[in-house]
Amino acid sequence: MRTDSSEGRRTDFPLLYAAATLCLIITVAPFAWMFLSSIKPTSEILKMPPVWLPSTITFEHYRRLWSSAFASSMVNSAVVSISITLTTILVNSMAGFAFAKYRFPGRERLFTLLLATMMIPGQVTMIPVFILLKYLGLLNSYTGLVLPGTASVFAIFLMRQFMMGIPDSVLEAARLDGASEPRLFAQIVLPLAMPAIATLVIFTFMASWNEFLWALIIMLDESKYTVPVALAALNGQYGTDWGLLMAGSVVTILPVLGVFLLMQKHYIRGIATSGLKG
Amino acid sequence: MSRPRKYLLRVLPYLFPLLLLLGLFAALPVLGTIENSFFRDIPFLPRHWAGFENYRAILSSSDFRKSLCFTLLFTAVSVPIEIVLGYVYALTLNAVSRRRLLQAVLLLPWALPLVVAGRLWQLDTDYHSGILNLLLTRFGFEPVNWLGTPARAFTLLVVADSWKTAPFVAIILYAALTTIPQSLYEQASVDGAGLLRRFLFITLPLTLPSAFVAGLFRSVDALRIFDLVFVLTHGGPGGGTTSLSLLAYRYYLSGDFGTGGAVSVLLFAVAFLVSLLLVRLLRAPTEAAV
């Protein structure tokens, strides 16, 4: 067996494998049921007693999903989530840089004030934001869905903590070489902050992809629904169409899983070194 | 130009976008909500100043008290469970060798929209054909109507929420675990410390600050729980699982912006007080650990 001491101890406890297996079962069982339901014929989904494995595998639910309004909601969600993620990273890395690497009067007080906004529940600000967006003519628009989600306290916390770990000497050296401040930020600080950015990409993409209430309220046209809203709307007129819903759920997780696997390499380092240790 | 002002001019370009966004979508709405809560504002009647009337009415209503109890109890029960479960996940991740794949799999529930998670649990706990009742009957128990009583609906919500968010806690704890020097464990082993002692005297103190941050994030989230309740129990049975968020939403939906605003402000106050309390309560052990 390989031994890599830095990576942690190899286990010699059967107990731990038992724990790992239990964790896996708890986590995976509902997903397995979800996936199996999505390829079962409708008649077998709610059968009593339940059918474990489908008698015939059918992709009928996926085909129906594809020809429903759900397909366009995937595109909507992709546009919205990518916009939110990019804007969040730009806005918060800029602010994080200012908080981490510049001294200015009132810095600590301003940062504490920002952290306090974390306690504000989204449902509290919902109605006033709605009225504000109506006033700005941004209801039922992607801009209106994207903008309120981009100023994230978690994001600025993460960026600041991480950038505080970048040594000042690196910045000083670049300044001596004649780099302007914006160039310093774009070409030195941002690349060094990659682990934090990767972490933020995962958190933000996941949160915006899954956002429900706000997307439900602000988008009035069914053609502009995002995935979670479209999924909730899949509730048929005569009760839940479970086959369609489960197929939709399976499709919904795939992009998030993709982003996660893409960024996985960086992000544990991002959390570990950004001092989310408090 | 004075020095402080020069500094301010230099950072302003970096801060401006964030401050603009937070001002528009956090500060302004909060002020708006607070303002709303002092007005009587219901459909078909002119909006008029009400002072603390909305607060008085809501604080003396049994709906609010029930909702407050549920929200606090839900947070107090689910967050500790999530932290413990998060530790189990994180320690397991840290101990096995195929961690890349396991990590991705363990995170699956967290990647799922709450709406979907809610529906999934609905399917799993269906009285007639849910997998849970199937297992119960297989082992000789009576099937359970999981949404039948407030206590059962509460249990279901805690289970579903823990299942969904323990991976989030696990990731933060796991990151902390990776920063503990291996030599500490080796030294302790040489000194004859067993698994439990090593956990209690090395792992736990060194990861406590992370657990605290995770707990804080989770508490604030749990106090604001909306989606899961909305999908899974609709606040029932008998209003027994109506969270404060849902209560505010219901008032808004009925067009009663004043009362909805008052509930929202109270929810904010509760979230603020709880996080303040947590910070106070946990500052001592956390600082000792750092």
Image (spheres, coloured by chain):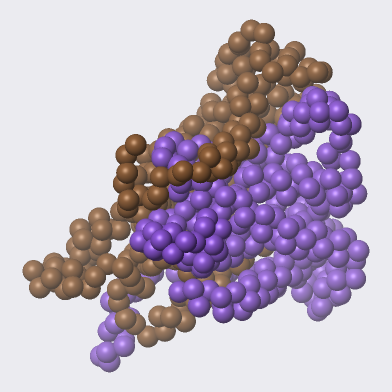
Q: Position of residue B29 (x, y in %)?
A: 61, 66
Please tell me which residue lies in front, A173 or B96: B96
Report the chain shown in purple.
B
Please tell me which residue lies in front, A110 or B10: A110
One can see residue A210 in this view:
no
Q: Position of residue B240 (x, y in %)?
A: 86, 52
Q: Position of residue B162 (x, y in %)?
A: 66, 49
One can see residue A189 in this view:
yes
Q: Kindly identify the residue that appears in the image at 84 percent across and 45 percent down.
A: B152
Farthest residue in the bottom direction? B2
The quadrant the N terminus of chain A occupies is: top left
Q: Kindly identify the residue that appears in the image at 51 percent across and 43 percent down.
A: A13
Residue B10 vs A10, above or below: the answer is: below
Chain A palette colour: brown
Q: Kindly identify the residue that appears in the image at 61 percent across and 16 percent down.
A: A39
Please tell me which residue lies in front, A126 or B247: B247
Q: Is residue B1 left or right of residue A262?
A: left
Q: Is residue A61 left or right of residue B242?
A: left
Q: Position of residue B173 (x, y in %)?
A: 50, 56
Q: Is residue A170 left or right of residue B170?
A: left
Quarter of the image for residue B20 reads bottom left
Residue B178 vs B201, above or below: the answer is: above
